[in-house]
Amino acid sequence: MALPVLVLILVLVLVHAYKILSRIRYKLPPRPPPRPIVGNLPDIKPVLVRCFTEWSEKYGPIFSVYLGSHLKVVVNTAALAKEVLKDHDLQLANRNRMRQINKSSKNDMDLIWADYGPHYVKVRKLCTLKLFSAKRLEGLRPIREDEVTAMVESLKNKGKAMVVREYLSTMAFLHITRLTFGKRFIDSNGVIDEQGRELKNILNSSLKSGTKKSVSAEFLPVWFSIFYKNENAALDAHNARTDSFTKKIMAEHSLARRKQQEPFHRRFAHSPRGDMISAGLDTVAIKVEWALAELVRNPRVQHKAHEELDRVIGQDAPSHAPDAPPQGECGCQDRGLRRPQEEDVDVKGTGYRLLPFGSGRRICLEAQLGITLVTSLLGHMLHHFTWSLPHGVDDIDMMEQPGTVTYMGKCLEAIPNPRLSAELYKRLAVENI
């Protein structure tokens, strides 16, 4: 009995000594003290951004952290971000894939998790030229206007407190699925079809799986997986369900292409579509909900935004009016609202102060699509409505929700009060392009 205990103690001592020597040899940044095997996993708080901010204040702008036995380094200044994302971009262009991510990404065949190499460059070039070019985004403008104006029309007669996220998520779902699959899963009466329900269930399952304890198990030794059998089985079932849905959609497109006598490349069709949905579905709703929450709790700022929109677009013209300047002196663009040019904050990764889309070789491909949709959606919601808090509510809870994406902890509830004439709330319906 004593021998196994001595062996275990010896192993732990050797592991601890190796970590100390590694820190001395490689001059690792300061860090919170890790525990054996689990590292700093027990110390990580649910809202990662707040946890890392606290550690940055304690250990400095660059610190290391052990997720299980995996060493990670966190930087928290624009200068350090530039060094990581520009000066050493090529050396740090690959992404660490965990066991479950390897399964869902088909061993790096997707775009988000693929290693930087010939396959990644080829797929990214294909997406840049065929999916996200300026010409393509402008060609998709009618679909964007259709879905945004459909949401505006549905809000016209509300007149009471509503959960904003529900409408934003539905609009983002319809927009991104029309771009990726070329079809609308919800009819004009708001009834979702069978494929739409299946896709929504898959997406909801994906969000939930990112917050389960099995994610922590990915950073632990393989033998720990025996304690997470149910979670791992659920993830495997989710991946199988996603593959089945994707094959059905690909079969439909393959049949349509054969009728049109056009080639259909199955190898590259899977990854960009899945990546577009996972990267573009939640982010738009999240950004607009946070922005609208700030405007609702600051009526003075909302009033200034209304004045700017009225000055550029007017109260007797829809937000998509052709005579509205594409980029006037006040910074209005694409029927929405941007900050005045002299106060612009770069969001495309070149300033390194704000990195919503990342930067460098792995910068988000959908950056311009996201900016266009967010400004359009927020501009329509501000131009058509005055937003106010429900009766009896004095402020909004601005705490974040734990998880892989930063939703508001409590859904925003607000009252949309129409401020334009009734004919400006009609939907601009178009067929798929």
Image (spheres, rainbow, N blue to C red):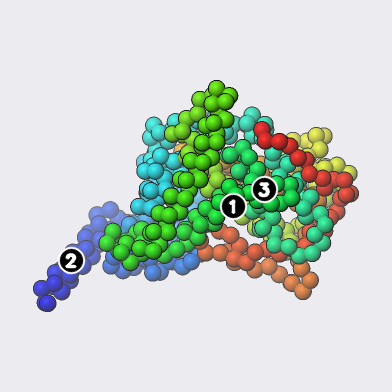
- Residue at point 47%, 59% (across, down): 209
Residue type at tag 1: Arg
Q: Which residue is mark 2?
A: 11
Q: Position of residue 370 (x, y in %)?
A: 61, 44
Q: Quadrant of residue 372?
A: top right
Q: Camera-side residue: 30 or 334?
A: 334
Q: Camera-side residue: 238 or 7?
A: 238
The residue mark sitting in front, 2 or 1, is: 1
Give the quadrant of the C terminus.
top right
Residue type at tag 2: Val
Please tell me the numbered disc located at residue 186.
3
Give the quadrant of the N terminus.
bottom left
Real-space CA distance between mark 3 and mark 1, rounded to the nearest whole angstrom: 9 Å
- Residue at point 40%, 62% (across, down): 231
Q: Secondary structure at mark 1?
A: helix
Q: Which residue is mark 1?
A: 197
Q: Earlier in the sequence, mark 2 or mark 3?
A: 2
Q: Secondary structure at mark 3?
A: loop
Q: Position of residue 271 (x, y in %)?
A: 47, 40
Residue 208 is left or right of residue 428, and the answer is left
- Residue at point 76%, 40% (across, down): 429
Dots 2 and 1: beta carbons under 8 Å?
no
Residue type at tag 3: Ile
In the image, farthest residue toward the bottom: 1
